[in-house]
Image (spheres, rainbow, N blue to C red):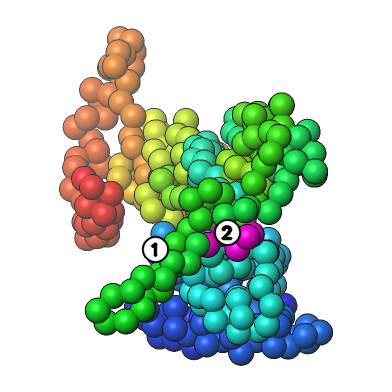
Amino acid sequence: MAKRDYYEVLGVARGASADELKKAYRKIAMQHHPDRNEGDKAAEEKFKEAAEAYDVLSTPDKRAQYDRFGHAGVGSSAASGGGPGGMRMEDIFQNFGDVFGDDVFGNFFGGGGRQGGGGRRQGTRGANLRVKLKMDFAEIANGANKKIKVKKHVPCNVCDGSGAKDKSAIQTCGTCGGSGQVRRVQNTFLGQMQTVTTCPTCNGEGLSITQKCGNCKGEGRVYGEETLSLDIPAGVHDGMQLSMSGKGNAGERGGQAGDLLMVIEEEKHPQLKRHELDVVYQLHMSFPEAVLGTQVEVPTIDGKAKIKVPAGTQSGKIFRLKGKGFPAFNSYEKGDELVEVNIWSPQSLSNEERDLLEKLKNSPNFKPGPDAESEKERGFFDKIKDAFGG
């Protein structure tokens, strides 16, 4: 099932402000919250779909990529699933509890709320990880699966990321009673004022560790290496940044992992040059070949192609190979390959070759005098040169 437009999901205009996004998300999430719709899978999917949309649109970098490229621009950064509702419930409660406050994740639905909701959080989120991905012309044109090894923080395999020696070494925080928050009431001339702050003892986690894991020293993570399989869509370009959610550094003590930010680095082609969606090839021909005409083989992104060069072809003539360029990112548009003819002149001649050219030099057919069609071709070439920066 295709994903719905994120602005449509939240029911806001494309230029909606941060406050408008937050208000719209809060309204939908409260309507479809699992505690209000127990056992209703459709409501749960709408709840997760709204969280996915808010995750992208409330993050400036993700929103910019989404506005420009649609769902392909954010890739798997918003959700792990392919359809709506791909986010995990625990991620939603952990990341967006501050949107609602205690009325949703606390007493409003009865009881103490869900783990990770409200002010309570689990661990500390890991840092994002940035990597450069080198891609050649063929990979950019067709998309590619890249397997890379990255050095980063990974969950400790001894304590499973908890940071504790064993389960008995994890206790409810005595300061906040497991809520992750400390409430203080102060008497002022305006009356009593209540403030809620993050618990200073457990840093909002609601838990305390009595004995730390010997392998990770209580962090719940260690520095290691992970092999990642990355599916890069066709049509990316040099400097473009893609992201994958949860593939960055592991968080402390079970905290959410950061994102993996992938910056595309375009490798130069030995014969072709890129200009937006088009590619350009400089075809060098000898004078006799241009005069008599010939058939030549030229390189393309995916291999080679044969083109017929008619007799009397002028230097600067451009042949267009339709659809042999790059595809546009997240679009059906595709560029062409432009083959520019350059007449090559030899640097040294034998006496016999020189005599032949001397005889031809004064022949009427060898006197420069471009006809109207040649002038038209030259004008077209000048426009192409201008488009390519001279």
**Labels in figure, total:** 2
Q: Under tag 2, what secondary structure?
A: loop
- Residue 60 disc label: 1
**Is 277 above or below relative to 305?**
below
Q: Position of residue 8 (x, y in %)?
A: 52, 85
Residue found 34% across the figure and 37% down from its top: 342
Residue type of the residue flagged with mark 1: Pro
Task: Kindly report the secondary structure that dominates the magenta region of the rendered protein.
Answer: loop
Q: Which residues are magenta?
A: 177-181
Indicate yes or no whether the magenta region holds residue 178.
Answer: yes
- Residue 331 disc label: none
Q: Callout 2 environment at 10 Å: few (<14), some (14 to 19), or many (20+)?
A: many
Q: Is residue 115 visible?
A: yes
Residue found 48% across the figure and 50% down from its top: 200
Tag 2 residue: 176
Q: Earlier in the sequence, mark 1 or mark 2?
A: 1
Determine the CA span between mark 1 and mark 2: 34 Å
Indicate yes or no whether the magenta region holds residue 222.
Answer: no
